[in-house]
Amino acid sequence: MAGYEELSRLDMTYNDTPRIRTREGVEIYYESRGEGPDITLLNTFFLPVPAWRVYTGELEKNYRLLSFDLCNHGASSKVPEEPTWEEHVQDLMGLLDAMEIESTYLVALSTSTVFAREAALRHPDRIKGMVLTGPAFGPRGMRRQRQIQRAWLRTLESHGLEGLYEHLYPEVFSAEMNEALGAPGFLGFRESFSALATVEEMTNGLKRAMQDKSSPEMIAKVTVPTLVLTGDDDFLLGPTGAKELADLFPDGRCEIIPRAGHIAFIDDPEGYQSIVHKFVEEVESRA
């Protein structure tokens, strides 16, 4: 797989980009790269904007990529109460309006797949299609996801960011990536992880993620074209579950990346971007 080189090139520094005001008291940090049909990259609570750069270079050649930090995370505004999914969607719409983007594709990861689903339900006219990478909801319910998130939260509360990292690492990274990186990779990536966010930000994000109430009936109401994309070594949703989830969407399909884990684009950036490119071109051809 080709993901090891990208990991070594991670640059977590921020640009001196003006923030965009999306609602009262909230300004959002964003980055925009490339030209073409618009693709918006949705962060999780664990992933800030800079992390996308090395994994989206090929997509940047054909599309305009928009990425941004969620309110209360990264370089965006901090507010007293952790935003609801509805408020995160408001921020997205405000950002699209400011950028004069009429409609966009969404590429989401893990907990941000919930964000994408909510945006597609509330504003189907603004979402051309979405790619759900390692979805944080499944074809039946949310019990397993909540149990895992609760375990992460307890580890964070009792052992801090370093303890959470040690808990997450063997779950999120594929077996193949784990073996290839070895101890040096584990220790090196730990430093980057510890710099991503504070304990408070992580705690608030996990608590928000646990409040999702996905159901097959809700998924069936999503009308936009949807690609469920997962690695076959994803600890959260395996190939069978991913295919069953895709079947619940009225216009859904599924792709499985061999030997990839929960964050499939880390294991196979080239293959991941190729699949996203193919999906977007297919949807564009229908227009």
Image: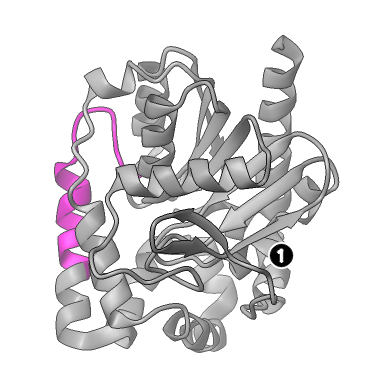
The answer to whether residue 259 is visible is: no
Judging from the image, what secondary structure is the residue with disc 1 in? helix
Reply above or below: 223 against 99.
above
Q: Is residue 285 found left or right of 143 in the rendered image?
A: right
For image coordinates 44% across by 38% down, the residue present is 116
For image coordinates 76% across by 46% down, the residue present is 59
Q: Position of residue 160 (x, y in %)?
A: 25, 86
For image coordinates 27% across by 50% down, the residue present is 84
For image coordinates 32% across by 23% down, the residue present is 219
Answer with the quarter of the image where residue 127 lies: top right
Q: Quadrant of the N terminus?
A: bottom right
Q: Position of residue 124 (x, y in %)?
A: 47, 22
Q: Position of residue 221 (x, y in %)?
A: 34, 16
Answer with the quarter of the image where residue 115 lies: top left
Reply above or below: 237 against 153.
above
Foreground residue among 208 and 23: 23
Magenta stretch containing residue 95, yes or no? no
The answer to whether residue 286 is visible is: yes
Foreground residue among 272 and 25: 25
Magenta stretch containing residue 143, yes or no? yes
Foreground residue among 160 and 45: 45
**Extent of the magenta region:** 136-152
Crowd tier of the residue under label 1, counting other residues whose Cα lies within 10 Å: few below 14, some 14–19, many 20 or above:
some
Q: State how the image is colored.
A: one colour
Q: Is residue 260 found left or right of 61 in the rendered image?
A: left
Q: Is residue 249 found left or right of 19 in the rendered image?
A: left
Q: Amino acid at mark 1?
A: Val
Foreground residue among 13 and 109: 13
Reply above or below: 141 against 84.
above
Residue holding disc 1: 54
